[in-house]
Amino acid sequence: MGALMALLRGLMAVNSVLLRVGRTIAWVAIGIMVLIILYQVVMRYAFNAAPNWTEEFARFLMLWMTGLIAPSAYRWGGFVSIDMAVRTLPRIPAAILSLLLLMLAMTVLIVGAMIGWSEVTGFSGSFTTGSLYTFVFPSLSEGVTFGWDKMPRSHMMASLLVGMWLLVLVNTELVLKSLIALFDPDRKLPQDTAMIAAGAE
């Protein structure tokens, strides 16, 4: 049990850092997204000259915001769940059922991560966005120089890949907590201090 606790503490430390960075980027992304949408509304209805890049950029930010904030919501129990069966069962069957559900969730998340990888590296990821540009670094093999070029669609779909792997890490943490709670129900498990500070416990 000591080895599981050490593994849990290490994984929680890694998750805390990654998710804190993710939440910070997500807050910034949603703030910029709101400003862009307001800019689009003003330009469309006040000046009758809506720019064509605002909607796509807002969608780009929304995807990344979702991919980076969802793992924190999952870790803090912010997803919708139906736990009537778990609450009505005795402790050991309830813990086993929770563990089985977490393993089922792990399977779904790994499949989602594989889909995300195929979206980033596959054929569809090689297409470019309609109106977004990204900075191009020089490549000696292809003779590309510094400059701007259309953003590959893979930059947008990478949000799915990153979000899914962060969810896999969080799910692994929850599996470890369930295992420890199953075999040692009296042991006090470590808590995420950011969750406590946010009042989400």
Image (cartoon, rainbow, N blue to C red):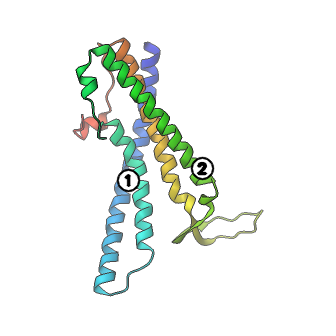
Q: Residues within 10 Å of mark 2 (few under 14, many from 20)?
A: some
Question: In the displayed image of the protein, which residue is found farthest to the right?
Answer: 141
Q: Is residue 8 above or below residue 75?
A: above
The residue singled out by tag 2 in the image is 118
The residue singled out by tag 1 in the image is 26
Tell me: 161 left or right of 33: right
Mark earlier in primary sequence (2, 1): 1
Q: Secondary structure at mark 1?
A: helix
- Residue 148, percent across and down? 59, 72
Q: Residues within 10 Å of mark 1 (few under 14, many from 20)?
A: many
Q: Is residue 47 above or below residue 162?
A: below
Q: Is residue 156 above or below residue 5?
A: below
Query: Residue at coordinates 29% horizontally, 40% vertically from top-left?
Result: 80
Asked whether 104 or 31 is in front, the reply is: 104
Residue type, numbered disc 1:
Ala
- Residue 123, percent across and down? 64, 58
Q: Is residue 172 visible?
A: no
Query: Residue at coordinates 41% horizontally, 30% vertically from top-left?
Result: 12
- Residue 187, percent across and down? 31, 14
Q: Is residue 104 visible?
A: yes
